Image: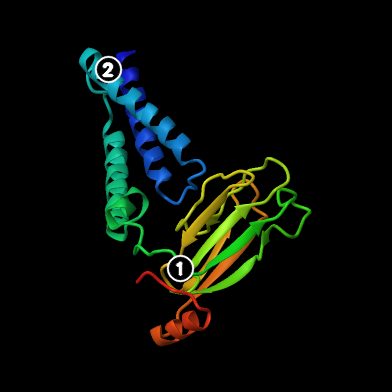
Amino acid sequence: MDKTITWISLLLIVTGVAGVFLTYSGVSKTFEHGMNAVSALLLLMGVLMLPGGLLRGGPPKVSVKQVVIVGIVVFTVSAALAGAAVVGYGPFRLLYGTGPAVGESPIKVFVSIVPGSWDPRQTENYVPKDIKVVLAINHTVVWSNDEDLDVAHTVTHDGGLFDSGLFGKGETYKYSFAREGLYTYHCVPHPWMRGSVEVVSIPPEQVNEILRRLNVTTTS
């Protein structure tokens, strides 16, 4: 029985570590806190149970075949973790940061989550659905939940760059884009809701001229 406890504790530790890794591997922030809590609980239970199992029953006995299998698994996992660390994947993204910091743009673009967006039969949800913004002019986008009912939505980048988490009726989410590119996003609980933001840049002199014509002043 003590050896069984050892095996169970090892399984809990592995499961807990895997849960922590998955939390930072592109999983939506909508579920991040729950996954963190469950993974930490499993990991803690495994760590607390392992000493008892080892002291009372000793390390579990394994055959030569099992040693080979475990060795292959350990090597594969180690190689995967090393690769993830090199490219900054999963929890290793914390070592690389989340990209360049950028301030809010002098002009903001507003996207409305219109009433009835929760209904898959409704074709309009993010309005406007596809927008284009210019760096240093209007690269800050504000999404507002304008539902009539008390329904929560998210603004979640398909690649995990940004995620609003659930925000309810009357609430807003704001994000400032820092690089050129096409950014597609969706709503986690309502995946038929999809939109995109195309970010472009123009020469600084053109930026200044546009802002001057619009009579917009900047703090920089």
Question: Quick one: SS at disc 2?
Answer: helix
Q: Say few, some or many: other residues with alpha carbon within 10 Å of mark 1 (under 14 / 14 to 19 / 20 or more).
A: some
**Depicted 200 relative to depicted 140: above or below:** below
Q: Amino acid at mark 1?
A: Ser
- Residue 219 is marked as none
Q: Which residue is mark 1?
A: 105
Q: Does the residue at mark 2 contact the one at mark 1 (Cβ under 8 Å)? A: no
Horizontal side, residue 22 vs residue 146: left or right: left
Percent x, y for residue 164? 51, 50
In the image shown, does 92 or 183 lie closer to the viewer? 183
Question: Quick one: SS at disc 1?
Answer: loop
- At 34% from the left edge and 72% from the top edge, which residue is drawn? 220
Q: Quadrant of residue 208?
A: bottom left
Percent x, y for residue 153? 61, 47
- Among the two numbered marks 2 and 1 on one chain, the one whose residue lies closer to the N terminus: 2
Q: Is residue 186 visible?
A: no
Viewer-side label of 2, 1: 1
Q: Amino acid at mark 2?
A: Gly
Horizontal side, residue 201 vs residue 78: left or right: right
In the image shown, does 200 or 182 lie closer to the viewer? 200
- At 42% from the left edge and 44% from the top edge, which residue is drawn? 22
Percent x, y for residue 41? 38, 27
**Depicted 153 relative to depicted 51: above or below:** below
- At 49% from the left edge and 52% from the top edge, which residue is drawn? 163
Q: Which residue is mark 2?
A: 53
